[in-house]
Image (cartoon, rainbow, N blue to C red):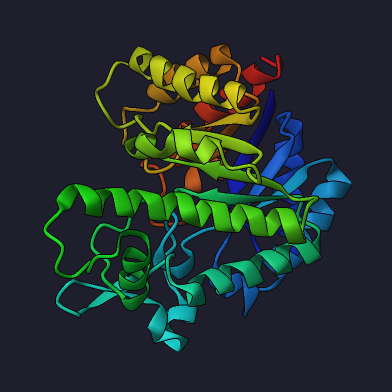
Amino acid sequence: MRTGVSYMGHHRPRYIHVDLTEMKELGCDDVLLAAQEVDFIHFTGKIQFVPKIAKDIGLRPIAIFWGVLNLFGGGRSSQFLLENPEGFQKAKDGSHRAAGCFVNPVCVNQIQKMIDRIAELGFEGYFIDEPTPLKNCYCKACQAQFKEWYKADLLFSKDDSLIEKFRKRCVVNYVLKISEYCQKNHPKLETFCCVMPRDKAVWGEISEINGLTNIGTDIYWVNDKNPVEEMIPMVREIAALCKEKKKKHHEWLQCWDVRKGQEDRILGQGQILVNEKPDGLYIWAWQGQIGTYETCDDPNLAWEKAARILRMAKGLN
């Protein structure tokens, strides 16, 4: 079982080296850099130094685009959309929505350029992170795609089931485009995709994408009341899909935004994931995501629990 941690990172190599060395001491195999758009423009040391330092230490560097296009996880602050407003989503009434649209070729092209950059810098994997249906986008790209697929007008369609089908199909189509792009242009990149539990309706179709090598989900229940044992069928469902389609299987464990008093649920969920033996077990995020708006109430305690799981996965406890 490979283990790793998502990492908000730093632009100065001395601090990157300290953090990655500690990850290696916990038995980690991978560091998953949460790279924002600003890291490609202003704080470039973050993406520039992580790959070499990681490899020197013995970690595999993987890139996740965090908050890019104001989509895909947190950290949403898109300079690209400010400079390319045609990439924004549009509501049905034509009003502006704050996030980009992954159906729009302008946005897809930007993601592909960023993938080119991380491949050039020496990252060994790319994570398509939490693609989810854009339920309220009626931009020109969405309208054109709906017309091409269904010979109908998205703006005036009354067929809610068809629209829902369209939204899900757009997710699968996006993952297909990106994974095929990676396979064609950067075949050495391992291409991951994490699909949230709420989007399990597309797990099957995504598992069939040839260019995708690694699939998983993130059951972030630490702050919920669900008995942790109830996650087991979900983990086994996606594991079975991966086995059938010959994909690697990963799972994420929550160590972000953990509310005070809930820290032991990190251990409860983590022990289940270790027992289920996915190919990869990843923690979001390094040191309880301290210093961000998604930090845990007690990041030190939360991280202590998460670190125990990392050691347990490697038999280091």
Q: Residue furthest front?
A: 151
136 displayed left or right of 67: left
Q: Residue furthest bottom?
A: 83
Residue 262 horizontal/vertical position (percent): 33, 27
Q: Residue furthest right?
A: 56
Camera-side residue of 176 and 60: 176
50 displayed left or right of 257: right
Would you say residue 181 is visible in this rendering?
yes
Query: Residue drawn at (31%, 54%), measured in percent from left and top?
Result: 166
Q: Determine which quarter of the picture holds residue 86.
A: bottom left
Query: Residue drawn at (49%, 25%), measured in percent from left and top?
Result: 238
Camera-side residue of 91 and 277: 91
Query: Residue drawn at (33%, 15%), measured in percent from left and top?
Result: 230
Which quarter of the image is occupied by the C terminus? top right
Residue 134 horizontal/vertical position (percent): 31, 58
* Residue 161, placed above or below residue 260: below
14 displayed left or right of 284: right
* Residue 75, placed above or below residue 110: above
* Residue 199, placed above or below residue 137: above
Q: Determine which quarter of the picture holds residue 28.
A: top right
Which quarter of the image is occupied by the N terminus? top right
Query: Residue drawn at (59%, 22%), measured in percent from left and top?
Result: 244
Would you say residue 64 is visible in this rendering?
no
Camera-side residue of 174 and 128: 174
226 displayed left or right of 177: left
Residue 196 horizontal/vertical position (percent): 40, 39
Residue 241 horizontal/vertical position (percent): 52, 25
How many callouts does the rendering have? 0
